[in-house]
Image (cartoon, rainbow, N blue to C red):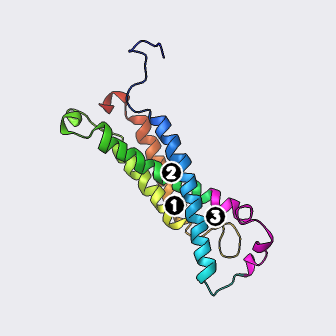
Amino acid sequence: MNSESETKLTGINTWFVIEILSFYGYIISAIAFIFFHGMKSTFSSKKQECHKDRYKYDFLAYHKKDLDWLAFVSILFNVNIGLFCIDEMIIYNTPEKREGKTFPLRNIMIQLLANHGLQMIFLRDFYDENRRVNTNSQWVWYVHFASYCYIIWVYISVSASEEG
């Protein structure tokens, strides 16, 4: 409170924004998960054998791993989108603020967003229809491996002075 103006935090505290996006992302993904499964159990005529004991347990306790996995995947997706929005709409929202700046890690952020999009589409369910760990879409993991090797190489090879 009595800090000198040079030591006070000014601007956007990015880490705090990431924490907020993660917290509310978990809540929103839980709401979406419960809504989706409520609609699925209400309107689906297909009863799965693996879910016959589901009604003996609390819904959230029974689906804890599914819910945690969906939250993990959706938080990664939401944080990337949030950081792009902050960058585009708040920090560098005018041409004058962008002038002379280079953004060498922007392509990596786009690539990470694509990776997390693939996870949201193909790997959002932790368990498959037989209540076993979902091993469908294994090709996504191979794409992720190649992509993350490239991302790490670019991150290490780009110097901080190129950030602008």
Q: From the viewer's perspective, is residue 97 above or below residue 33?
A: above
Q: Which mark is residue 119?
A: 1
Residues in magenta, as a range = 49-68
Residue that protrudes farthest toward the bottom in the picture:
45
Residue at image position (70%, 62%) is: 60
Q: Does the magenta stretch include residue 55?
A: yes
Mark 2 touching mark 1, by CB under 8 A?
A: yes
Mark 1 to mark 3: distance in Å? Answer: 11 Å
Q: From the viewer's perspective, is residue 36 above or below residue 113?
A: below
The amino acid at mark 2 is: Leu
First along the sequence among labels 2 and 3:
2
- Between 109 and 139, the one lying in front of the other is 109
Question: For the residue labelled by badge 3, is the local secondary structure a helix, a strand or a loop?
Answer: loop
Mark 2 touching mark 3, by CB under 8 A?
A: no
The amino acid at mark 3 is: Phe
Q: Mark 2 points at which residue?
A: 76
Q: How many labels does the image show?
A: 3
Which marked residue is nearer to the observer: mark 2 or mark 1? 2
Q: From the viewer's perspective, is residue 60 above or below residue 108?
A: below
Left or right: 145, with 66 as reference point = left
Residue 131 visible in this rendered orientation of the protein: yes
